Image: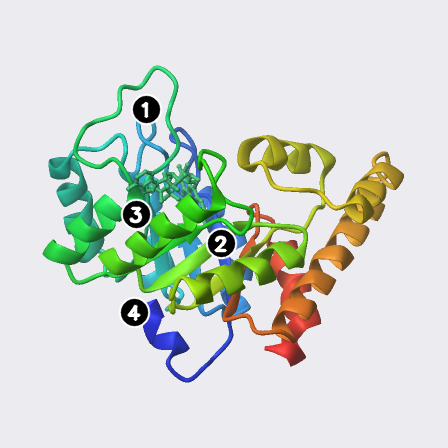
Amino acid sequence: MKVSELYKDNKKTLSFEIVPPEKNSELSSIDETLDILCELNPDFISVTFGAGGSENCNSTIEVARKIKEKYNIEPVVHLTCLNYSKDEIDLIARQLQQSGVQNILALRGDKVPNVQAKNDFKYASDLIAYMKSKYDFCLLGACYPEGHPESESFVDDIKHLKEKVNSGAEVLLSQLFFDNNYFYDFQEKCKVADIDVPVIAGIMPAISKSQLEKMVSLCGVTIPPQLKRIVHKFSSNKDALFDAGMSYGISQIIDLLTSDVDGIHIYTMNNPMVAKRISTEIHNFI
Ligand code: FAD
């Protein structure tokens, strides 16, 4: 099923993101996580993909195939393009077709140090236009409620997002954020720019100090003072931080669901307990 179909009746979706096992790990190492995630019956599960270079994209495809065939849940495969040629993208697209994958989150990917970018795709919108012209996938695109870190201005970022949608992105998945006001402002900016596809809010509960610090340095997202105080207060008590971080994330989600959000995408960090607790707590709001 194409994920874009889900939003036709104004349904609010709940979906999860997982990271496939690394190159030298057994594929089955993710089975236990998948068992729990799929039992929660999400609308889809997205599977991340390397930015290109040394890693093996087969594990992304194999995990997606498993999600579809074993659990009958719709997978969305992330696909980056900066470090791939058209021929390489065609090869992956054919493997995805053979695996029954119908949905692709088409991304540029980050620049990888010491890897020379190929010249076929400069931006995600190039990949989206190419995939749209050659294949019949539902294409999703990434969006950034606080702006993409490389953007010169928010106005430019929104202009490029509009190009992404014009190229064929049917659904947008957001970068994580910890202050809903950024998301609500972003929704307004999308409206003004006439971007009228579903925009799914990406949420990552702050359950670990190191993970939070890593995400902030990678994505440049803002940590509100209240969350900073929570992390500081419980930094030496792992269980208390888990509880407090989950409560913060769940309040964020309930606030979004009682406002005008099209769906919630949980960055599970492969911790199925995060997804389980959120699903239980927000059940009545979906
Ligand atoms: P683009 O949409 O191409 O944008 C990149 C930058 O270029 C932006 O600043 C944009 O404003 C600018 N731009 C776009 N078009 C133009 C133009 N025509 N002229 C000038 N400037 C332009 N990375 C991975 O490696 N693997 C993953 O699995 C992965 N999953 C992700 C999932 C989500 C939901 C999100 C939000 C991000 C994910 N990323 C992933 C990270 C992503 O690859 C990086 O954020 C990357 O830097 C940008 O990718 P993009 O597709 O948003 O790029």
In the image, what residue type sits under mark 1? Ser
In the picture of the structure, the residue carrying the numbered disc 2 is: 174
- The answer to whether any part of residue 65 appears in the image is no
Amino acid at circle 3 = Ile
In front: 238, or 212? 212
**Disc 2 or disc 3, which is closer to the eye?**
2
Mark found first going from the N terminus, 4 or 1:
4
Q: Residue furthest right?
A: 233
Disc nearest the viewer among 4 and 3: 4
The residue to which callout 1 is attached is 54
Mark 1 Cα shell of 10 Å, populated few (<14), some (14-19), many (≥20): few
Residue under label 4: 2
First-in-chain label (4 vs 3) = 4
- Compute the Cα span from label 2 to label 3: 22 Å
Residue type for callout 2: Ser
Q: Residue at x 30, y 44 (%)?
A: 124
